[in-house]
Amino acid sequence: MLLPTLTLLTCFLLIVTLLPISNHTHWLIRGLDFPRLQIAIAAILLLIFQLIVLEITRPSSLLLICVSGFCLFWQSWWIVPYTPLFPREVKRAEKNSQKPSLKILTANVLTPNRNSQALISLVKQHKPDVLVTLESDQWWQNQLSVLEDDMPYTIKCPLDNLYGMHVYSRLPLTETETCYLVEDGVPSMHASVRLSDRVRVRVHFLHPSPPSPTENPESQERDAELIVVAKSIADSAQPIVVTGDLNDVAWSETTRLFRKISGLLDPRIGRGMFNTFHADYPFIRWPLDHLFHSEHFTVKSIKRMPSIGSDHFPLLTTLVFSPKAIPENEGIDASAEDRSRADEIVEKENVSKSEIPQPTAHAK
């Protein structure tokens, strides 16, 4: 009885490990990108149990152990970069640097959540240069209006469909634009933020819809929005930041493709996962809220903030403008196959990089 049970568990582990490799866009398959850490933990426990109870000399036992070991290796390959065991992709900022910095607080507030004071308190305590809220409706806009004395530059798009978005900034915002790139009712925001008289940064705030049984049965819409923004950035030498709730995990194939095509860097690599969702369930968490940036920056800090009553934790990231660090920061390159796949993704949704606003940015 024990061997059939272990065989069944090992086959299930193999299936959930192999299915995402297909790149099929169905929500059930793409959803298996999310719990890679949990699947890796399950593989460790199963492997330990197999080593204890099975006779390793038997071919059937050895096969089960090898399969579990492969699954553990494969899941670990995706998640280890988001631990301190891996080299940092972005260098640490110099201590006491006097260079211009950009502190961004990204917060999915959860529309029905009414604990606005928790977010307001975080903003007053940490004083971010830019606050971007996701899922913020008219009620949230009314509550957050108290921030406008200190953060007078705003972009507002209150919606009651879980895709409202707001940006509040201490720093001047110019060329602001709200777009619906792939789906009606799912906005993105684009602007130029002035760090100093000599430095302006192009910023993109995103919140594409997720693949799920209640929204989009396929991931095509989400993937297309991420990749078309990546393609619009690819050939730019400007300082750029992209942030938001991307409804995708940091280690998914789609997010990895976004990084390859855009050339942007992920400050979490070599530092930690910074799992922001689900705030209520410690054992079911993954990194859904992201910040990527161009090679013009180093990282002063990146922190997951305390709960604000949402199902997401806010993410606070401080970047330092350090153009001399360009040769030291290392991203990942796109292959011809990657570029072909990116073209295929955006063509399916009939969206072009020419539709993406390209706010002015410069670094003198």
Image (cartoon, helix red, strand yellow):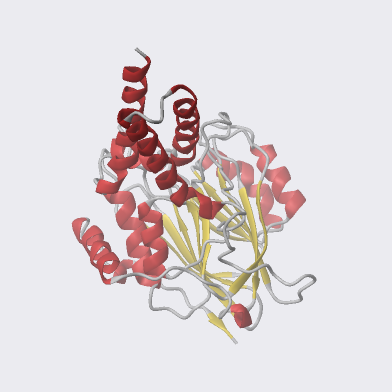
**What residue sits 36% from the left and 68% below the top?**
261
**What residue sits 19% from the left and 56% below the top?**
348
Q: Quadrant of residue 295?
A: bottom right
Q: Quadrant of the N terminus?
A: top left
Q: Quadrant of the C terminus?
A: bottom right
Q: Position of residue 98 (x, y in %)?
A: 76, 76
Q: Position of residue 46 (x, y in %)?
A: 45, 28
Q: Position of residue 100 (x, y in %)?
A: 69, 74
Residue 131 as seen in the image, left or right of residue 227: right
- Front-most of 17 and 262? 17
**What residue sits 25% from the left and 45% below the top?**
25
- Front-most of 186 and 5? 5
Do we see residue 180 in this rendering? no
Q: Quadrant of residue 197?
A: bottom right
**What residue sits 66% from the left and 59% below the top?**
151
- For residue 91, above or below residue 108: below
Q: Position of residue 246 (x, y in %)?
A: 44, 50
Do we see residue 149 in this rendering? yes
- For residue 328, above or below residue 345: below
- Front-most of 234 and 253? 253
